[in-house]
Amino acid sequence: MRKVLSAVLIVLACVLVPLGGLSAWAKYEIGDTGRYVETMAPLAAGPDVQGAIADTVTDGIMSEVEVVGPLEGEVRAYVRRAVRSFTGTEAFRAAWNTANRAAHDAVLRALRSDSEGAVTLDLAPVTARLKAQLADDRVPLANRIPVEHTEVTVLRAQELSSLRKGFHMLEVAGFWLPLTAVALAAGGILLAVRRRRAVTATALGLALGAALLALATVAGRALTLAGLPPHVSRAAVGAVYDALTSTLRTATWFILALGLTVALATWLTDHRARRRAASAAPAPAPAPEPTRARA
């Protein structure tokens, strides 16, 4: 019974490792507004995000400005250069952080409340900051950019109820699943008849769970990029995905390396102990010579 119960506890602990890592990442990294904004902030200086924003803003400006004929291409190129230059300023980084904080706060409030409507974000403050910066840089037609209270849907109403249930589960699991995994692993090792083997099996199971979580992260990136609309920049979304999962990937590789190191160290210790026991054992006594019968 001790062997069976120990094996069951160790297997459950190894199964909970990837689930606990994923839920802890979602709770403490994605679910925290400050950490989310801190993670997203460096992307404002990345060429992929800056290029995607420059294209989007340029399309929006050109849709509001009536320019026809051969000048349209030149005006579009000039406006894009101006917007691209703006993305390298401190004002853009401040607007980027403000927009990310506002969007994250809006989503968290909706997930933690009982509201049923869609989650929207007003882009008027960001547009006003952009217009003022372009006007200060004497960009042509900058004063004609309309500053309207444009609401962008961050989360649709039909998605809110299902995401709310999953979010509540992650908030609970993000704290208890890692602790449960540690408790099950400790219990399985303490109940084991041969504890060194149990430690080796637990370490290898932890490494396997971490490897599966790493593969799931890579697969999630591929699926995310494959499901994007044609007009969305895959490079920019890939940069955002990599930034958000950076902590998860670091923790995954740490657990994988730790598991393999512990398993190797335990195996070497057990092998050395067996060799010492074999060398310390007394040598078997020589068998007595058989007596010969006299003729």
Image (cartoon, rainbow, N blue to C red):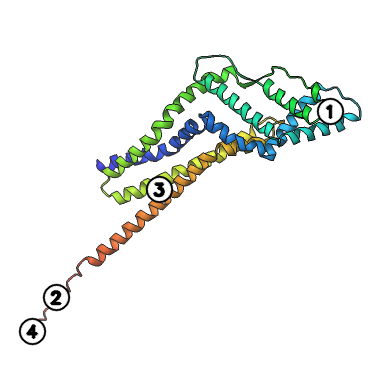
Q: Which residue is mark 3?
A: 204
Instruction: State which quadrant residue 77 falls in.
Output: top right
Mark in the foreground, 2 or 1: 1
Q: Earlier in the sequence, mark 2 or mark 3?
A: 3
Q: Earlier in the sequence, mark 1 or mark 3?
A: 1
- Provide the secondary structure element on which disc 1 rests: loop
* Residue drawn at x 47%, y 30% as measured from the top left: 27
Q: Earlier in the sequence, mark 1 or mark 4?
A: 1
- Provide the secondary structure element on which disc 3 rests: helix
Q: Which residue is mark 2?
A: 288
What amino acid is found at the position of numbered circle 4 in the picture? Arg
What amino acid is found at the position of numbered circle 3 in the picture? Leu
What amino acid is found at the position of numbered circle 2 in the picture? Pro
Mark in the foreground, 3 or 4: 3
Q: Which mark is residue 294?
A: 4
Q: Position of residue 94 (x, y in %)?
A: 65, 31
Name the image quarter holding the N terminus: top left
CA distance for labels 1 and 3: 64 Å
* Residue drawn at x 52%, y 18% as measured from the top left: 161
CA distance for labels 1 and 4: 127 Å
The answer to whether mark 2 and mark 4 are in CB contact below 8 A is no
* Residue drawn at x 23%, y 66% as measured from the top left: 280
What amino acid is found at the position of numbered circle 1 in the picture? Pro
Q: Which residue is mark 1?
A: 140
Q: Nearer the viewer, residue 99 or 279?
A: 99
Q: Please state the total of marks drawn on the protein image.
A: 4
* Label 3 crowd bin: few (<14), some (14–19), many (20+), radius 10 Å: many
* Label 4 crowd bin: few (<14), some (14–19), many (20+), radius 10 Å: few
Q: Nearer the viewer, residue 109 or 251?
A: 109
